Structures are given as structure tokens and as C-alpha cells.
Amino acid sequence: MQQDYLEISGLTVSFDGFVAVDGVDLSVLPGDLRFLIGPNGAGKTTLIDAVSGLVPAAGSVRYGGHELTGRKVHRIARLGVGRTFQTATVFEELTVLQNLDIAAGHRRGPLALARRRRGIPEEVERAMETVGLTELVDAPAGVLAHGQKQWLEIGMLLVQDARLLMLDEPVAGMSAEEKDETGRLLQRIGADRTVVVVEHDMDFMRSFASSVTVLHAGKVLAEGSVGEVQADPRVQEVYLGPGHHSRAEVETVLGEVS
Amino acid sequence: MNKRWAVPAAFAVAAVLLFAVAPLALSPFRLDQLGRYLCFAIVAVGIGLAWGRGGMLTLGQGVFFGMGAYLMAMHLKLADAGPGGTPDFMALISSDGVPWWWEPFRSEIVTLLAILLLPAAVAAVLGLATFRRRVRGAYFAILSQALAAAFAILLIGNPTGTGGSTGLSGFRGFFGFALSDPANRLVLFFTVAGVLLLVLALVRQLMVSRFGELLVACRDAEERVRFLGYDPANVKTVAFVVAAFMAGIAGALFVPIVGIVSPNDVGIVPSIGMLIGVAIGGRTTLFGPVLGAIAVAWAGSALSEQFPSGWTYAQGLLFMLVIAFLPGGLASLAWRRRARAAGPASVSAPLPAPSGGN
Ligand SMILES: Nc1ncnc2c1ncn2[C@@H]1O[C@H](COP(=O)(O)OP(=O)(O)OP(=O)(O)O)[C@@H](O)[C@H]1O
Ligand SMILES: [Mg+2]
């Protein structure tokens, strides 16, 4: 398990000269529920894109003893790296069961693929229970509510047996109860996995993060516990503007300070 | 439970129609015509898989159809000429004898294997090369069109090897059986009908298998599939290869039935023609492409007997109308009716595929 941590060093992504991620160093251990926050355009999504192989990057990303940079998306996925997207992306015409079954299947051989599925695979059953979609097993994913799609995506990561999960704004647009449920879900699945959550929702972060990294203009601005990050003057400056800020001001933007 | 029996029942009806009703009801001439339509239906089944389920707008199936057809035609010409003999058309044009690359096709086994394997192998190479480079949508369609055009030009430019623009014709025998004998022609028709049912069964199995679900996933969200650890290029290539395999077999059967194959059967226009029936019938369904292809081929012969040039325009117009107003083809009318009957709360009605070539 010691191998299963994520270690990013000097990661740089540029788009035609514009540097979206600028020399980021970041390590996340299994069991950690790491939140990645930062203002719009900070480079959070681009960082996840780089780790998952979607955009080419300079520097190094190591996970489970493998260097990830330069590998193809599906090869990185096979190393146990899974991600979700800022706008939930599921196979809308396929059912919840079919979506999960596909996510479970990249190891299947040609013969297994050529056959019809009989019954529900055990890991799919378990994932449906974990994310609470058992009732909707035969519903086309396209008719699911927004929050349910996010849960389906998390379920897909579970059956995919991803050990490193990167979630891009999983609770955006969810109701308060849905957020709570998602948070508890993330804590449960994060107990033995490496989980990175990109979020703008500060209350959600405060409730569920075990550690936080703040990204700004492509660079790591601060890192630590929720309290440390909230108290960091540089973080306050980025979120609230320059100068000293009262506790009340900080609490409105960065969430209640404990 | 009627859903569970719908497909086996449709297969049974098709078998009765093809093996009992058609031979009794149709004159030998009409039966030959139907046999030709069934060849296009076999191509259509493959296109339904690649385009309807896989999202690949295969506008160049004439290439694979033509490969199967020319392989068969070469063998039939060699067989007619007898052991060591030179086919009649070759002897007329040149005195060089049979080109070296014709020689292997004197053998029945080699010919049959080549028909089964060569179009599929070419499709595998092409598919991997294009899909790995993420060529898709309109670019893939244009590429396949260009291929069909190039193939036709290659055939025309090589008259000693392929009969040039007149193609290969005048076949007398088919694996030892005289093609002039009506009984043999009936067997030929049954062969085509049987092959059609077989390829339908194969595609049916692929559609309901896990592969079929994965293929739809690749069609609708190719990028997403990568993050689940699959290479969509491989998935799409398999569907493309299956479609090419079927087109090759159809081409091979077309030759003894029609008695001629020429570049006019493999170029851009016939390649598009192979797709139109699929679009009209409903590309995402199992039987839609078959019915559409037969209907279009039938209308084609019926109309072109009266208005030789009008049919090409009518065909194009029909294609545009279907794509614009009924993207799911005629089959989507049936879904709509069923969905309406089930009421708005129904979520299980299959949704017609939205995008064309993506
Ligand atoms: N493909 C691209 N080409 C050019 N610029 C890009 C591309 N993708 C992202 N960017 C730029 O990189 C910067 C970082 O974008 P990114 O999406 O990573 O931000 P983010 O932190 O996820 O923001 P948000 O919170 O709004 O999602 C932005 O300025 C964005 O415009
Ligand atoms: Mg983002």
C-alpha cells in the first residue's frame, strides 16, 4: 500500500504559451481526502487532466510506482487512476447497470465481451448499493437527476477499481442533503483509497476535507488542514482581495472557522 | 414477454418468407432480383452495426464489397478457363497470360478464404490506422469515400488485370455447377438467404452482448470510454471489420447472381447507395437496415426501368429527407408509437440516436 500514493513534482501544463499549471508539487497518501481549491481558472481541472493523461504535461506524476506522464489515457486508467468530470459524463442511452458494467470490464477478454451479461456482477451490485442507485438499475442514465449522475460516475470509479480517484466538482448543483450524502460517501470510499476532490463549495470542504491544497494561477499557494488554509493570509488575499480581513469576512467566503 | 420472443419470431418469419414464399411466388427472374437485393441487405446489416451502433459513417463499403466481388469473379473466370487456361477477356487484350496475382485464385479454398479474410484484414489495418489517430465523424466519412473512389479508379486503370471499366462478366459455372441451370440458381438464392440470416444472427449477438453496449458507449462518449481503461480504437475497429467482412461476402455472392461486376458496383455512388437503405430503415435497429436496403434496391430497379436517371436524384432526396426529418429512420416511427402508447412516464423506450457521424 505504501506504493499507492500520488506524487506530483514540477508538473507544468501550457497551452500555446499560456501556463495553466506551473511547477506544481503535490503528494497525496491513501486514506487522505484531499481537497483542491482555488479561484476559477486556477488550473484545478487542468491538473486533473494532466494526471489522467488528457493533456500533455512536463514534470513528473508518479502513482503506484509508475510514471504517468507520457502515457495514454486508457493505460493510465488501467493503472488504477479514475476521474470524474466537471459536467457529469455518463452514457446517457445506456442503463445504470450497463454504465457500471462497462466500467467494470476493461479486463474482460474477447469471449466475455462477445457474450450477453447474465445477472448483475457482484462488484456492480456492491457499487450500486454504495452510491444508492440500486432502485434505478434499469433506468437509462440520461433520465437521472444531476446528483444521481455524479453518484453513478463515482460508482463507475468504484467498479473500475480505481485506487486513485480524482473528482471534479462532484457536489456542484446538489441539494444540501445530497452534498452530505456525497461527503459521507467520499469519506467511506476514501478510507483505503487516494482521493482528490476539486471543489468550490467551502462548507462542503470544511465538513469533509482531511487536507487542502490551494491552487492559484497554476501554482500551489498553500497546503495543510482546513484551519491552516483558512487562516493563511495569502489564501485570504486570493479569495478576498489584499489587506487584513475580519473573521466574519473570512467565514463568509472560506466557510466557518473552527 | 412478447419482447423476448419478438426477435426469434422475426427470424422465423424471415426464414419462411425467404425459403418458402419467395421461391413459390416469384418467377426465376424476380427471384434473381431479390437475391441481388439480399446481397445489399447483407452489406446493410454490417453498416447498421458500424454506423448505427458504432457511429462510423462508413461511406466506402463498396471497397469491401468490391474486394469480395472481384475475388469471386477472378476465381469464376479462371475456373471457366479451365486448368492453366487464360480467361477470355485477358486473351483478347494482351498475350501476357494470367498475372501472377491471379494464380492463387484458381484454388477454390484460397478464394473462399481470401473472400472471408481479405476485406476484414484490410478493414482492420485501416480501422486501427484511422481510429488510433482519432479520425472520426465527417473526416472518417470523407476518407472512406476517397477510398471507394481510389478503388474504382484502380480497377478502371488496370484493364488486363480487372477487366477495366467493363469489369468481369460472362461466368458460366459456380464451383462446378452450371449457372444457367434454374435449380442451381435456386440453391444460390437459398445460399444468399441463409447467409443473410446468419449475419443477422451474428449482429444480433453482437448488439446484445457486452461488446454491443461498449460500442454504443464509444459512439456516444468516446473520450469517456478511455478513462475506463479501454482503447475505443480497438472497439470501433472490431465493428468496422465485421461490417467489411459482411460486405465482402455480399460482394462474392453478388457476382454469380448478377453475372457481372464492374467499377460501377464499387465506387462512390454505389457506396452511398448501400448506406441509404440503412438510413431509411433505421440504422440503430437490427432489421431496419435489411428492410431499408431491400426497399431501396427494389425501388431502384423498379424506377430505373422507367426513369433511368431520375432514380439517382430520388435516392439522394430520400436520403436527405430521412436524415433531416427522421434521423432514426422509419423504425423510429414504431418507437414513437410505442412510447406514446406507454405514456410519458415511460423511461424504457429506446431513444433514437441523435448524432449522425460522430
Ligand atoms: N484546452 C485549453 N486551451 C487553452 N487554455 C485552456 C485550456 N484548458 C484550460 N485552459 C485555461 O487554463 C486555465 C486553467 O483552467 P482550468 O479549467 O484548469 O481552471 P479551474 O481551476 O478548473 O477553474 P474552474 O474552477 O472554473 O473550473 C484557464 O485560464 C483556462 O482558460
Ligand atoms: Mg475546473
Image: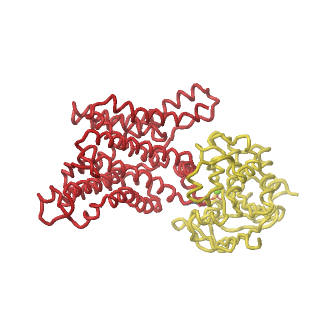
Residue B327 occupies quadrant = top left
- Name above or below for residue B334 compared with residue A231: above
> Is residue A172 found left or right of B94 in the rendered image?
right
Chain B, hue in figure? red
> Is residue B127 found left or right of B86 in the rendered image?
right
Q: Which chain is yellow?
A: A
Q: Residue at x 26, y 65 (%)?
A: B101
Residue A142 occupies quadrant = top right
Image x and y of residue B325, in percent: 43, 33
Image x and y of residue A140, in percent: 63, 41
- Name above or below for residue B120 compared with residue A22: above
Q: Which is more toward the observer, B154 or A183?
A: B154
Image x and y of residue B36, in percent: 31, 41
Figure quadrant of the N terminus of chain B: top right
Residue at far right of view:
A258
Total marks shown come to: 0
> Is residue B87 found left or right of A57 in the rendered image?
left
User: Looking at the image, what colour scheme do you see?
Assistant: by chain
Q: Which is more toward the observer, A184 or A109?
A: A109
Q: Which is more toward the observer, B251 or B52?
A: B251
Q: Residue at x 33, y 51 (%)?
A: B65
Which quadrant of the figure shows ligand 2?
Answer: bottom right
Image x and y of residue A186, in percent: 77, 55
